[in-house]
């Protein structure tokens, strides 16, 4: 595990997650209020990018079949997905967002 500098705070908003890859991994940064969270960006149900989903408060809805996930924890809240999204530690320094991957 190592901290990776991913983007800057101005590239993320509550309605616009930031998608990125590290190695083979697809991840996304989500903003809820003033906090940032990093989650796997591929829905565990089939294949859809969660960064293309619909964010409402602390929840993101998969754009393909509508599974809902809790952004701060990655927990699956509604089917058809039956697995959580992995979440990763995030820290912010001088407007730069770092993720521990
Ligand atoms: S691909 Fe996300 S709910 Fe089916």
Image: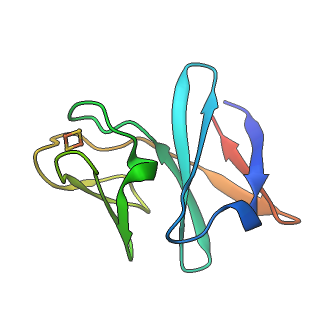
Residue pictured at 71% horizontal, 58% vertical:
91
Quadrant of the image containing the N terminus: top right
The total of numbered circles placed on residues is 0
49 lies left or right of 78: right
51 lies left or right of 56: right
Q: Position of residue 92 (x, y in %)?
A: 76, 62
Q: Position of residue 35 (x, y in %)?
A: 60, 71
The quadrant where residue 20 appears: top right
Residue pictured at 54% horizontal, 63% vertical:
16
Quadrant of the image containing the C terminus: top right
Vertical position of residue 36 compared to residue 97: above or below:
below
Residue pictured at 53% horizontal, 26% vertical:
25
Q: Quadrant of ligand 1?
A: top left
36 lies left or right of 62: right
100 lies left or right of 37: right
Vertical position of residue 20 compared to residue 56: above or below:
above
Q: Position of residue 27 (x, y in %)?
A: 53, 39
Question: Considering depth in this image, is 72 or 56 the residue closer to the camera?
Answer: 56
Question: Considering depth in this image, is 38 or 45 the residue closer to the camera?
Answer: 45
Among all residues in the image, which is located at the extreme left? Answer: 80
Q: How is the image coloured?
A: rainbow
Among all residues in the image, which is located at the extreme right? Answer: 94
Q: Position of residue 83 (x, y in %)?
A: 22, 39
Residue pictured at 56% horizontal, 19% vertical:
24
């Amino acid at each position: 595990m190592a901290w990776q500098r991913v983007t800057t705070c101005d590239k993320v908003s509550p309605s616009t997650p930031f998608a990125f890859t590290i190695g083979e991994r697809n991840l996304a940064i989500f903003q809820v209020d003033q906090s940032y969270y990093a989650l796997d960006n591929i829905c565990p149900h089939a294949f859809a990018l969660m960064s293309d989903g619909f964010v409402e408060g602390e929840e993101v809805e998969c754009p393909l079949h509508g599974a809902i996930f809790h952004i701060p924890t990655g927990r699956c809240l509604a089917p058809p997905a039956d697995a959580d999204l992995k979440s990763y530690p995030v820290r912010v320094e001088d407007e730069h967002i770092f993720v521990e991957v």
